Image: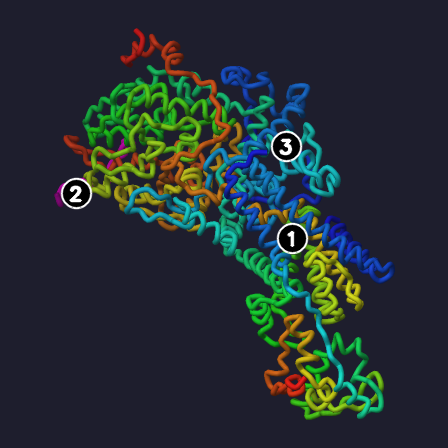
């Protein structure tokens, strides 16, 4: 098969292939790091507080919907000064607070939140208002 | 009829993937085998299509001139609409590809009593087309965050801009809304305008529904029925690093439906009108400079033809020519 | 011939498509909408296949046994030869932007006159025979079998397209229906399915050098009449030369300019201008046609007819060529001639002997448009002009399709026009320049038996003229196209009575003050000049 304007056409094809396969070669040689969530030691707090290892809602639900929940909490607290949250799962009453509830157990932003958020390139706007905790333990360990 | 066939075709495709994952655990098929096959088909198909076009020459220089030619120095030529050189062609093509220049000219012709023909502005098709293509591109680029280990700044910036309204959580992407609106408009237009419905084929409705299906499943799993997004990325990363492996977590059937419809789109692409993406670059009425009189254009298959020569002509008419006092070569 | 309905009836256009799909709607050959079939004699002269007596309205078109094979091989061959064709078969998305841009669709409401659908007529067969999807899914994928009915549909609609390229301006991918029609007609010609109004003139042009079949002595004779008329108006007897070796310039114009008014007035214009300049130029009786009806037949025939221009320039030893006012002629000269029959290395880059201007834009093909030449003269103040001699005229400008969209000569003629007339009014913006409307009779459709088609196709053009006629009292439609000069007068009489048609150089010559001319009392048409006495007093 003879090509006419072959130079331009081949160039076009090369550019197309280079763009289309860009992620393939972009990742070559990069460590395939997965989120590595460290729950210990802070997770013990839950047992101390509530007598068992439990979160606000079931783990699977939290994994998918935590941003919805936190957004809802933010509105409830800031707009309605309502701080009480009844778990639909266990009926336990929780304090609607990122830092005084969630982060009591998941105490390390770096080892918990950031693991997935960085992996997914998500920048939650929690820390637009809240002051991000300084990670003391991390520095020691 | 054509609408229904296309709609149900896409619906069945979606259900096949959903049921395949939900009931038959075909995650590997829908998550690995089909995406790979579709992507390879896409690349090979598009390259093949371009080579096929490239194997036919452009025998004549036939730009459609949409403005003043370049002639006398004191006449202002239209460099963009009637380019006389390479730079102008590049600019014209850029306008065409990036901003759909020609479609921007669109008019609506209306006949009223008198009779009187009037030509009104008709920019909706241009606007919807532009909105659709650009949001599709941005969405595609945004998705690169699933395919890259350390997501580079431009991608996160696109994502940040797309969600800068900070509506809800997860943040609402404007392109999601724009794409859905634009595709819906393009569909309504296609069925609503009688002439357009008349010329439309399944080849037109099917990709519309397919893209709508991809967008809807995407929107559903981001905002409504969330899937395990970390799992999704783990699968994507495994695919992209050519070490395919299903993640331990269950991502959700909706994700596989989304991925399958996208795979269908990729595989369908090279065999359909969607190849206009590549074809627009090769269109000889747009990508050539209007300089045929200044620069010789060679037709590779130009061949000698049978002509009626002057000698034959003179032989036919010599006496009459002499009678009229016209000079002749042979007395 | 069917009686032509009156304008009021003709302008009642139903744009609603039929309820049945277009593939299931058989083509009805409506009288007045198509031309006579090509005669065997014309095809024989041109060495074309299947010469025979046939009539388009007949059921039996006397096709060769293997007609389908011929066509399919013809398509395959052209897909390999023309990237445009292959690409345009593949990439249309049927967005419909072209639909209401076509003058034939606007004028007839027939959905198959939407450029997109006219292309689908052939695209559907392409899908069936040349694409995998079409082979597998058939009608579902918009594919259909090539049958005699499909062939007739092609014939009917490819001769309802004037290759004007207006659709191409609006298409986001630049798909050009002209290109598809050109190739469609090539295919039809493989089976001897031309129209006589094209095949006849093409045969004439091949044997006698021009479409009208004017033999050499007739050309001289016709020009004599024109020269006599010039003498009557100006008192000057001009003696142009023919087939003269050693002239500096060869002048080629459509033969229509020598045959009937208002084209003859344009020819008077050329003659008077060149005389006034003392230009060293010659006419040719061998290359006595600028137009090219081969272009409406096949690429090969177009090349065969066009070859005469360079051949004659070479034989006569001229330096370069000036071309007269013609539309498709200039598409051919501008975009095809050098590629077909060049390189013109035996000629020199055109240089105006009067102003010294070098026409760099024609440095390869060595042929310039007379409007370029005249605009340059006027810019350099080389002509004495009295535009008031055109004061009885309120003029508007019709951009011809080919010169607008296949060349882009928009400003030169306007500049010339504004120098020679005092009353100039543009038609509405969306109907001029690159968006100009066809006269409805281009690409060889200016016959008399398809008057319905011509009046319908010319409706958008005429309607825009009517607008300036009603608003500004425009009474003259000026242009640079011989087919316009032949076809616009009946169109105007039909839709906008009171508007006449003129070539650009007729108006130039009206205004041109010639050395030693007598006091002019009439214009070139013999109509009295306005404001004569007043002018004398002030002078």
Between residues C482 and C379, which one lies in front from this camera angle?
Answer: C379
Residue C313 vs residue C486: left or right? left
Other-residue count near label 1 (Cα within 10 Å), few / some / many at <14 / 14–19 / ≥20: many
Of marks 2 and 1, the one in the foreground: 1
Name the residue tied to disc 2.
C535
Report x, y in % for residue A103: 71, 87
Residue C251 vs B141, above or below: the answer is above
Badge 1 marks a residue whose secondary structure is helix
Residue placed at 53% from the left, 56% from the top? B122
Say what secondary structure mark 2 lies in: helix
Question: Is residue C385 found left or right of A95 in the rendered image?
Answer: left
In the rendering, at what x and y percent does residue C168 appear? Answer: 51, 44
Whole-number angstrom distance, CA of label 2 to CA of label 1: 63 Å
Left or right for B166, reference C407: right
Q: Nearer the viewer, residue C435 or B314?
A: B314
Instruction: Report whether residue B199 is seen.
Output: no
The residue wearing badge 3 is C153
* Residue B190 tag number: 1
């Amino acid at each position: 098969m003879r090509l006419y304007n072959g130079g331009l056409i081949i160039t076009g094809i090369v550019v197309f292939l280079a763009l289309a396969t860009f992620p393939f070669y972009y990742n070559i040689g990069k460590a395939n790091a997965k989120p590595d969530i460290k729950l210990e030691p802070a997770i013990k707090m839950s047992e101390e507080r509530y007598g068992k290892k439990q979160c606000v809602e079931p783990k699977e639900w939290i994994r998918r919907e935590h941003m919805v929940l936190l957004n809802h909490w933010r509105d409830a607290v800031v707009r309605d000064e309502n701080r009480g949250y009844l778990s639909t799962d266990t009926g336990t009453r929780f304090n609607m607070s990122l830092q005084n509830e969630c982060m009591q157990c998941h105490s390390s932003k770096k080892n918990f939140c950031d693991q997935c958020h960085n992996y997914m390139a998500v920048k939650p706007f929690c820390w637009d208002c809240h002051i991000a905790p300084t990670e003391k333990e991390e520095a020691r360990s | 009829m054509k609408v229904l066939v296309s709609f149900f075709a896409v619906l069945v495709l979606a259900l096949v993937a959903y049921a395949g994952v939900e009931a038959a655990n075909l995650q590997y098929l829908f998550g690995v085998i089909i995406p790979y096959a579709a992507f390879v088909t896409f690349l090979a198909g598009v390259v093949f299509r371009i080579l096929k076009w490239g194997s036919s020459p452009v025998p004549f220089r036939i730009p459609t001139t949409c403005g003043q030619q370049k002639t006398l120095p004191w006449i202002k030529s239209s460099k963009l609409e009637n380019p006389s050189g390479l730079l102008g062609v590049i600019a014209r093509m850029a306008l065409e590809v990036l901003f759909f220049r020609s479609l921007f000219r669109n008019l609506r012709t209306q006949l009223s009593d008198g009779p009187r023909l009037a030509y009104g502005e008709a920019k909706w098709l241009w606007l919807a087309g532009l909105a659709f293509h650009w949001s599709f591109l941005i969405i595609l680029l945004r998705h690169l965050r699933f395919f890259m280990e350390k997501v580079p700044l431009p991608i996160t910036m696109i994502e940040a801009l797309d969600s800068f309204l900070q509506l809800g959580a997860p943040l609402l992407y404007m392109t999601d809304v724009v794409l859905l609106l634009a595709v819906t408009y393009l569909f309504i237009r296609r069925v609503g305008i009688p002439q357009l419905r008349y010329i439309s084929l399944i080849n037109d409705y099917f990709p519309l529904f397919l893209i709508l299906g991809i967008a809807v499943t995407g929107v559903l799993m981001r905002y409504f029925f969330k899937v395990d997004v970390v799992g999704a990325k783990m699968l994507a990363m495994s695919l992209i690093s050519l070490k395919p492996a299903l993640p331990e977590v269950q991502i959700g059937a909706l994700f596989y439906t989304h991925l399958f419809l996208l795979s269908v789109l990729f595989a369908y692409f090279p065999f359909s009108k969607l190849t206009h993406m590549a074809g627009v670059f090769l269109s000889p009425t747009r990508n050539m400079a209007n300089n045929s009189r200044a620069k010789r254009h060679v037709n590779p298959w130009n061949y000698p033809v049978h002509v009626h020569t002057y000698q034959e002509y003179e032989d036919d008419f010599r006496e009459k020519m002499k009678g009229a006092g016209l000079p002749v070569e042979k007395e | 011939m069917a009686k032509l309905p009156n304008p009021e009836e003709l302008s009642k256009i139903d744009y609603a498509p039929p309820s049945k799909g277009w593939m299931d709607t058989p083509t009805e050959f409506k009288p007045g909408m198509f031309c006579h079939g090509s005669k065997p004699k014309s095809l024989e002269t041109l060495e074309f296949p299947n010469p025979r007596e046939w009539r388009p309205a007949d059921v039996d078109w006397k096709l060769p046994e293997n007609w389908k094979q011929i066509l399919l091989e013809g398509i395959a061959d052209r897909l390999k030869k023309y990237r445009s064709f292959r690409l345009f078969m593949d990439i249309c998305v049927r967005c419909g932007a072209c639909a209401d841009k076509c003058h034939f669709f606007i004028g007839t409401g027939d959905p198959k006159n939407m450029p997109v659908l006219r292309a689908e007529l052939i695209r559907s067969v392409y899908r069936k025979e040349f694409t995998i999807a079409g082979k597998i899914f058939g009608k579902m994928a918009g594919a259909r079998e090539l049958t005699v009915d499909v062939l007739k549909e092609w014939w009917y609609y490819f001769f309802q397209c004037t290759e004007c390229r207006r659709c191409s301006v609006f298409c986001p991918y630049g798909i050009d229906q002209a290109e598809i029609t050109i190739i469609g007609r090539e295919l039809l010609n493989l089976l001897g399915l031309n129209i006589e109004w094209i095949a006849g003139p093409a045969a004439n042009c091949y044997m006698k050098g021009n479409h009208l079949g004017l033999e050499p002595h007739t050309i001289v004779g016709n020009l004599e009449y024109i020269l006599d008329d010039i003498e009557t108006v100006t008192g000057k007897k001009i003696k142009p030369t023919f087939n003269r070796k050693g002239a500096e310039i060869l002048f080629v114009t459509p033969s229509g300019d020598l045959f009937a008014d208002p084209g003859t007035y344009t020819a008077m214009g050329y003659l008077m201008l060149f005389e006034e300049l003392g230009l060293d130029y010659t006419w040719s009786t061998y290359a006595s046609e600028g137009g090219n009806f081969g272009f409406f037949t096949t690429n090969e025939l177009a090349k065969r007819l066009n070859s005469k221009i360079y051949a004659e320039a070479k034989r006569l030893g001229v330096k370069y060529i000036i071309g007269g006012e013609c539309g498709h002629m200039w598409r051919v000269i501008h975009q095809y001639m050098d590629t077909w029959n060049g390189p013109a290395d035996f000629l020199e880059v055109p240089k105006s002997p009067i102003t010294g201007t070098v026409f760099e834009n024609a440095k390869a093909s060595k042929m310039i448009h007379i409007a370029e030449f005249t605009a340059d003269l006027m810019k350099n103040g080389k002509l004495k002009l009295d535009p008031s001699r055109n004061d009885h005229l309120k003029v508007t400008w019709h951009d011809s399709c080919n010169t607008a969209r296949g060349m882009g000569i928009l400003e030169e003629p306007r500049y010339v026009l504004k120098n020679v007339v005092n009353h100039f009014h543009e038609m509405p913006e969306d109907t001029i320049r690159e968006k100009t409307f066809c006269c409805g009779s281009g690409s060889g459709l200016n016959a008399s038996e398809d008057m319905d088609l011509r009046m319908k196709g010319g409706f958008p053009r005429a309607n825009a003229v009517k607008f300036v006629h009603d608003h500004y009292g425009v009474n003259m439609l000026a242009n640079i196209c011989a087919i316009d000069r032949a076809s616009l007068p009946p169109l105007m009489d039909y839709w906008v009575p009171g508007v006449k048609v003129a070539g650009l150089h007729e108006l130039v010559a009206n205004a041109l003050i010639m050395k030693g001319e007598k006091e002019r009392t009439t214009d070139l048409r013999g109509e009295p000049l306005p404001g004569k006495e007043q002018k004398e007093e002030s002078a």
